Every structure is written in structure tokens, then in C-alpha cells.
Image (cartoon, rainbow, N blue to C red):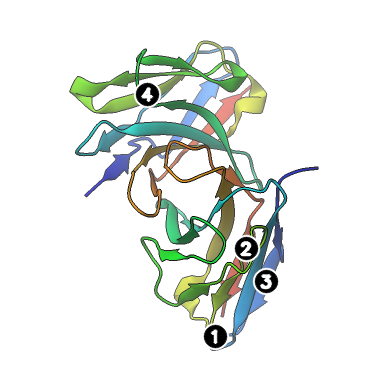
Amino acid sequence: IAGITQAPTSQILAAGRRMTLRCTQDMRHNAMYWYRQDLGLGLRLIHYSNTAGTTGKGEVPDGYSVSRANTDDFPLTLASAVPSQTSVYFCASSDGEGSYNEQFFGPGTRLTVL
Amino acid sequence: AQSVTQPDIHITVSEGASLELRCNYSYGATPYLFWYVQSPGQGLQLLLKYFSGDTLVQGIKGFEAEFKRSQSSFNLRKPSVHWSDAAEYFCAVGHNNAGNMLTFGGGTRLMVKP
């Protein structure tokens, strides 16, 4: 089934540890995004990539890094996790640039940093 | 700065009753507007979107929304709610900046009484 997969589904992590959240899409979409969802704040963009080999910062990029080595994969790394990074993380993709393109979302990763 | 406000955090309606979820936005240009739905434990799914033209847009699952420029609003409506509509609903405004960013409202959680 075409779509976006994220791994892990959930994770509990000690503060200071490094963690990579994985995201893979099989729709051959050019653009990919990472959001975090916090209660009452909706979703906020962390990083994005308009095409393989390029990345950019979103609204809340501090403490996170991304890479886009190919079209399908867009991992999000927390180099040294802090409790404020406890959140639900969603990966999304869209067919082309431009915010008018529908973004398709993965099922999310629930991350708890203790 | 762009912003989206969903004034109602929680709404409870009876099955079969009509529904209106409010969304107000702040954006300097003509906005791209979206409504997404998130079922428990799931990612977001696009319900409908407005870019231009007819200010009343139809979406999936029997939802519609009306763009009112004078009120900076994009309220979501459904004439008869079903129990399966219980979910969280997010309004978003799209930007044509480098990140193709969507700015989301804080969400409205809909509960449906039998």
C-alpha cells in the first residue's frame, strides 16, 4: 500500500541520548516535512526538504537535524534529546513544492524524553 | 506573522445534529486554506482546501467549508454528524515561502453523543 511509514511507533528515551526517527515514502514525492504535534499548538514544522539533496529549516528547528540522501527517506535526528522534545512527530510528503499541494501524513512517532 | 485560531478546543454534538467548527486566520495575502482531520492514533487526512474561486468548497465525508475574506474565516460545516466523525480537526493556512509551510491552528476535538 502506497504511503508513508514511520519508525518507531513510540519510544522512551533518556535525556542526552541520540535518536533518529525514520520516515519513508513510496509515492515518489519530491517534498518531505517533519512536524511536531503538541497539545493546543497544532502541528509545527521542524524541517523540510523540497527535493533530494536539499533541506531547510522550519518554524522550530533547534535541536533537530535532517538529511535527504534520496527521494524516499527523510530521517530526523535528535543529537542530544531534552525533555522539551517530548512530542508526537509526524512526517509528511507532497508531490511538488508549493503549499497548495496536499501533504500526506504518516502515522506518527510518539517520543518521550525523560 | 501568519496565525490560525480555532476558538473551540472541544465540541460535543449529538449524532445527526449539524456541526460548525470555527477557524480564523491572519495572513497578508490571499491564503491557501485547509481542513485536516486526525482520528485517534492516526496521521492527518485532508478534508478540503480552498485556493481561489467559489468560496464554498466541498470536501470528503460530507464536509464543506466557506471562505469569508471579510471575516478572515474558513469555518467547517457538516449538516448531519455521524459517530465516526469523532476526531480532532485542524485548520491550516499555507504559505508560499521556501518551506511551503502550513501553519496549523491548535485543533478542535469533536465528540459525538449517541
- Residue at mark 1: A15
Residue B114 x/y as whole percent: 65, 21
Q: Is residue A60 shown above or below B4?
A: below
> Which residue is rendered at x = 56% and y = 75% of the image?
A77
Q: Is residue B92 shown above or below B41?
A: above
- Residue at mark 2: A110
Q: Secondary structure at mark 3?
A: strand
Residue A70 x/y as whole percent: 64, 64
Chain of the residue displaying label 2:
A
Chain of the residue displaying label 4:
B
Q: Secondary structure at mark 2?
A: strand
- Residue at mark 3: A11
Q: Measure the alpha-carbon separation of dots 4 and 3.
A: 36 Å
Residues at circles 3 and 2 in contact by the CB criterion of under 8 Å: yes
Q: Measure the alpha-carbon separation of dots 3 and 1.
A: 12 Å
Name the kind of residue labelled 2 in the image. Arg
- Residue at mark 4: B75
Name the kind of residue labelled 3 in the image. Gln
Q: Is residue B96 left or right of residue A71?
A: left
Q: Measure the alpha-carbon separation of dots 1 and 2.
A: 15 Å
Q: Measure the alpha-carbon separation of dots 3 and 2.
A: 6 Å
> Which residue is rendered at x = 49% and y = 37% of the image?
A101
Residue A63 x/y as whole percent: 44, 77
Residues at circles 3 and 1 in contact by the CB criterion of under 8 Å: no
Which circle marks residue B41 in the picture? Answer: none
Name the kind of residue labelled 4 in the image. Asn
Name the kind of residue labelled 1 in the image. Ala
The earlier-in-sequence mark between 3 and 2 is: 3
